[in-house]
Amino acid sequence: MPIFSTKSRLCTALLLVTIVASAFQPVYNDKGKMRLRGISSATNKTVITYHADKTIAELLTIYQTAESSYSTTRIPVYKDGRLISIFVTDEESSQAPALFSSFEYSPKGKIRRIIYYLDGAVHGYDSLAYNNNGLIVARYFFNDTQDGVAFENNSCQLFRWDNKGNIVRIENMGRVNRKLPFTLSSTTTYTYDDHPNAQQSIPSLCYLTDITAENISANNIVTETITGAAGDNSIVKHYSYTYNAARYPSRITARYAVNDEMVVTDLEWD
């Protein structure tokens, strides 16, 4: 019996991660002054453990719902200092962790492809392009087709960076089929503070969590604006921070445009 059935909560979560997952320049040592140990909000808590060389050993996330709680664990595997694969498991599984993703590198040491698995079979991959500074500028999503014999690319993202190492613009592109050109579906723009980004201090963390500008940029996002292709009806999210003595955030308060919703996240360091 496969580790993830279609009813598995982890399977659903991983499929969502696959849609948005990408790979940025891999660095597998903690380059920050402090190590991030925990991320907590009202609905979940993530605990990070490390190897002696400061690479991530395991990432445990406990999700809390109105009815119950459940957990998932993500386990990275390294070889010669490089991340080569990620395995996942959850509390509902009695079997060994399952392969979720693996990584292919270019001769220059950049990740050129992330391959995704479901029930042991490849069901998609991301193809990556970089600029001369080693920063990703394009990501192309390839999904398996209904016949199961080919992969098709009908969506991509284009990235624009500033000179501080922050993503300032992401263009989401799509098309109906590969015979047509890509057209713009939406744009996301960002502004930042001047404090070091907690998540970016551990770059490999982005492969184990939701991979977004929040995890990759050098500084912390202050505003995030999502605008449709027509250029109207923008959605704006605002972020504010409480900082510790090392200038890293110890608390993040996010305010969403819809119903002025507020989400508070606490970060634990050592």
Image (cartoon, grey):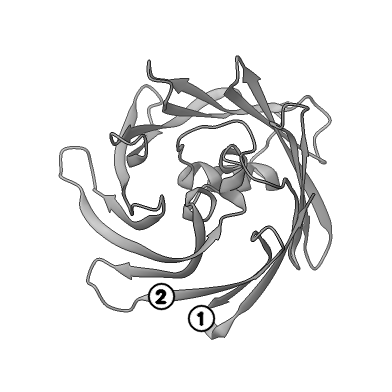
User: How many numbered tags mark residues here?
Assistant: 2
Circle 1: element type? helix
The residue identified by callout 1 is 258
Between discs 1 and 2, the one toward the N terminus:
2
**Residue 61 percent coordinates (x, y):** 75, 48
Residue 243 in the image: above or below residue 17? below
Measured Cα–Cα span from mark 1 to mark 2 = 8 Å
The image quadrant that residue 69 belongs to is: bottom right
- Residue at 63%, 32% (x, y): give it: 29
The three-letter code of the residue at mark 2 reads Ile
Circle 2: element type? strand
Does residue 203 appear in the picture of this structure? yes
Count residues near mark 1 (Cα–Cα under 10 Å), then give few for <14, some for 14-19, many for 20+: few
- Residue at 37%, 21% (x, y): give it: 149
The residue identified by callout 2 is 235
Q: Are marks 1 and 2 in contact (CB under 8 Å)?
A: yes
| Tag of residue 2 | none
The image quadrant that residue 8 belongs to is: top right
- Residue at 23%, 57% (x, y): give it: 184
In the foreground, 228 or 40: 40
Quadrant of the rendering where the N terminus is positioned: top right
**Residue 104 percent coordinates (x, y):** 46, 21
